[in-house]
C-alpha cells in the first residue's frame, strides 16, 4: 500500500469520527467534503488515468458549462489570490488554538450556534472554530506585543504599565472580533432592505424573460449588481449543485441565515410557490408592483437626498478627467500658492484670490460632471426606447431616430450585417456607450441569455427595471 493511500485512509477514519459526533449541520457538510477529497486522492492513486480527461472532452465540458478556458483560468487565479492569506493565517491560529476553541464550543453550545449564525449572516467565509481561534491567537499576540512595547516605553516609570497596555490591546482585539461580525451583519441587513424592492423587480424581469427555478437566481450572482444578495444566491446554488439539496430545501435553509426579515420572507415565499407548483412569473410581477408602490409612498425627502448624495459620489468616482479639467486644477493650485507668497498681507485681496483659485479648480470639472450626467440621462432614455423596439422586431428593421444613441445603434446594425453575433455586437455597444446603466443592463442580459432567456426580451425587461429603479430613487 502506498504512503498516499495509507495517509488518506487514516484521514478518512479520523474525519468520519468527527463527522459522527458533530452537531452543527454546516460543519458536518464541511467534514463530508474533506472525506470526499480524500476518497478522490485514493482513486487517483489507484487509477491515475481515470481522473484525466482528454482535450476534446475538456472542450465539450467547458462548452456545456458555457465558460471559456481563459475565464476558468482567471477564476482559479482570483480564487487563489483571494484566499491564500486568510487560509494561511487561519491554519496557523488553528495549530495553536483549535483544541481550546473546540472546548469552548463544546462547553457553550448556545454560543457556538449563535456565532455560527452570525458569521453566516455577516458573509464572513470562516467556520466558527477558525474564527474563535483567530480571535484568541490575535488577542494573545497583541497581549505579548503590547506588553513588550509598553515595557519599552514606560520602563522609567513601572513595568506594570507595560502589562496594562498589553491587556488593554488584547481586550480591544477581543471586543473588535466580537463586534465586527455583528456590525457587518447590520450593514448587510440595511443594504438588503434598501435593495429589496429593486431586487424583486430584477427577478421579475428575469422571470418574464422565460427563466425558471434556480436559473432565475444565477444571472444576479454573475452580474454583480446586487452584491449583498450574492451571498444568499451563492449558498442556494451550492446547496443544490454540491450538496444535493432540492431548490425548496436550499431556499428554506438559506432563509434561516439571512440577516434581513424581508429577504427571509421572500425566500420562504419562493419555496412555498415552487412546492405548490405556482407560476413564479405571476408571483414576482405582483410582488414587484406592490413593493414599488410602497417605496413610492414611503419615500421621504431625506431618503431622496441620501440617494442623490450616493449617486453624486459614484459620478465623481467614475468621472474621467479631460485635459481641460487637469489644466483648470493646475491653474487654480498655482493661483492659491502664488496668493500665499505675494498677497498674504492684503486680507481682502488674499481672500478674493483664494476664492477665485478654488472656483477655477472646481468649476470646469463640476460643469463637465453635470454635462456628463445630462448626457447619461439622454442616453438611458433613448436606450430604453431602443430595447423596447428591439424586443418587437429584428435589429435590421429598426429605423427610428434615437438621437444621442444613433452612432452606437448604427455601429451595432453594421456589425450584425457583417455576421458578428448580436451578443458580441452588444458587448461593443456597451463599451462604446461609456454609460454604467447601459453596460450593466447589457452585461446582466448576456448572463441571463446563457441560462436560456431570450436576449432581446431580457434586455428590454432588465433595462425597464433599472430605469424604474433610478426614477424612484433619484426623482
Image (cartoon, rainbow, N blue to C red):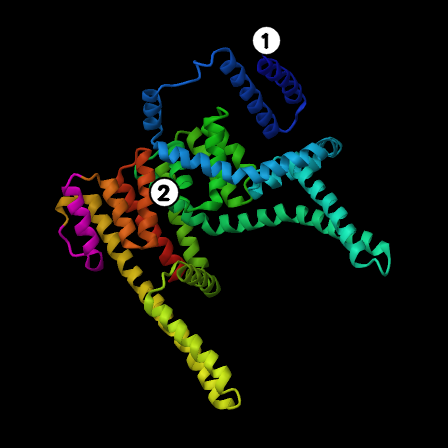
Task: Give the labeled residue for mark 2.
Answer: 204
Residue 269 visible in rendering: no
Callout 2: SS: helix
> Per the image, is 380 magenta?
no
The disc label shown at residue 118, or none: none
Q: Which residue is mark 1?
A: 1
Q: Position of residue 468 (x, y in %)?
A: 34, 54
Mark 2 or mark 1: which comes first in sequence? 1
The secondary structure making up most of the magenta span is helix
Query: How many discs appear?
Result: 2
Question: Eyeballing the image, is 343 above or below 424?
Answer: below
Span shown in magenta: 399-419
Seen in the picture, residue 367 relative to 258 is either above or below; the reply is: below
Q: Quadrant of the N terminus?
A: top right
Q: Residue at x 35, y 27 (%)?
A: 62
- The crowd level at tag 2 (other Cα within 10 Å; few <14, some 14-19, many 20+) is many
* Residue 36, picture quadrant: top right
Amino acid at each position: 500500500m502506498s504512503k498516499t493511500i495509507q495517509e488518506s485512509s487514516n484521514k478518512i477514519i479520523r474525519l468520519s469520527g468527527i463527522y459522527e459526533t458533530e452537531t452543527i449541520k454546516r460543519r458536518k457538510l464541511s467534514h463530508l467534503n474533506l472525506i470526499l477529497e480524500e476518497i478522490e486522492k485514493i482513486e487517483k492513486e489507484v487509477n491515475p488515468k481515470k481522473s484525466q480527461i482528454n482535450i476534446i472532452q475538456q472542450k465539450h465540458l467547458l462548452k456545456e458549462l458555457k465558460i471559456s478556458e481563459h475565464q476558468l483560468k482567471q477564476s482559479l487565479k482570483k480564487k487563489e489570490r483571494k484566499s491564500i492569506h486568510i487560509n494561511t493565517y487561519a491554519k496557523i491560529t488553528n495549530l495553536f488554538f483549535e483544541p481550546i476553541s473546540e472546548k469552548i464550543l463544546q462547553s457553550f453550545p448556545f454560543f457556538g450556534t449563535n456565532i455560527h449564525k452570525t458569521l453566516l449572516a455577516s458573509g464572513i467565509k470562516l467556520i466558527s472554530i477558525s474564527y474563535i481561534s483567530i480571535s484568541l491567537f490575535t488577542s494573545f499576540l497583541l497581549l505579548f506585543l503590547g506588553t513588550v512595547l509598553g515595557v519599552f516605553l514606560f520602563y522609567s516609570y513601572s513595568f506594570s504599565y507595560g502589562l496594562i497596555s498589553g491587556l488593554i490591546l488584547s481586550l480591544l482585539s477581543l471586543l473588535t472580533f466580537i463586534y465586527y461580525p455583528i456590525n457587518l451583519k447590520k450593514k448587510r441587513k440595511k443594504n438588503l432592505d434598501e435593495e429589496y424592492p429593486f431586487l424583486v423587480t430584477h427577478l421579475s424581469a428575469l422571470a418574464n424573460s422565460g427563466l425558471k427555478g434556480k436559473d432565475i437566481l444565477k444571472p444576479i450572482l454573475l452580474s454583480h449588481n446586487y452584491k449583498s444578495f450574492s451571498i444568499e444566491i451563492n449558498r442556494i446554488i451550492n446547496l443544490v449543485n454540491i450538496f444535493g439539496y432540492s431548490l425548496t430545501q436550499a431556499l428554506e435553509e438559506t432563509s434561516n441565515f439571512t440577516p434581513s426579515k424581508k429577504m427571509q420572507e421572500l425566500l420562504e415565499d419562493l419555496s412555498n410557490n415552487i412546492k405548490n407548483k405556482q407560476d413564479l412569473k405571476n408571483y414576482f410581477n405582483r410582488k414587484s408592483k406592490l413593493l414599488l408602490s410602497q417605496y413610492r409612498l414611503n419615500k421621504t425627502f431625506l431618503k431622496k437626498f441620501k440617494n442623490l448624495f450616493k449617486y453624486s459620489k459614484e459620478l465623481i468616482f467614475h468621472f474621467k478627467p479631460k485635459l481641460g479639467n487637469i489644466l483648470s486644477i493646475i491653474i487654480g493650485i498655482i493661483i492659491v500658492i502664488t496668493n500665499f507668497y505675494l498677497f498674504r498681507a492684503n486680507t481682502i485681496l488674499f481672500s478674493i484670490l483664494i476664492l477665485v483659485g478654488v472656483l477655477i479648480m472646481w468649476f470646469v470639472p463640476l460643469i463637465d460632471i453635470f454635462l456628463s450626467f445630462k448626457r447619461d440621462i439622454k442616453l438611458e432614455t433613448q436606450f430604453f426606447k431602443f430595447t423596447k423596439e428591439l424586443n418587437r422586431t429584428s435589429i435590421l428593421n429598426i429605423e427610428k431616430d434615437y438621437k444621442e444613441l444613433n452612432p452606437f445603434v448604427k455601429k451595432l446594425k453594421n456589425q450584425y450585417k457583417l455576421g458578428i453575433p448580436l451578443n458580441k455586437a452588444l458587448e461593443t455597444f456597451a463599451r462604446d456607450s461609456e454609460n454604467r446603466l447601459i453596460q450593466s443592463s447589457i452585461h446582466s442580459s448576456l448572463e441571463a441569455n446563457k441560462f436560456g432567456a431570450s436576449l432581446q426580451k431580457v434586455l428590454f425587461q432588465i433595462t425597464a427595471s433599472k430605469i424604474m429603479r433610478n426614477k424612484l430613487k433619484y426623482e
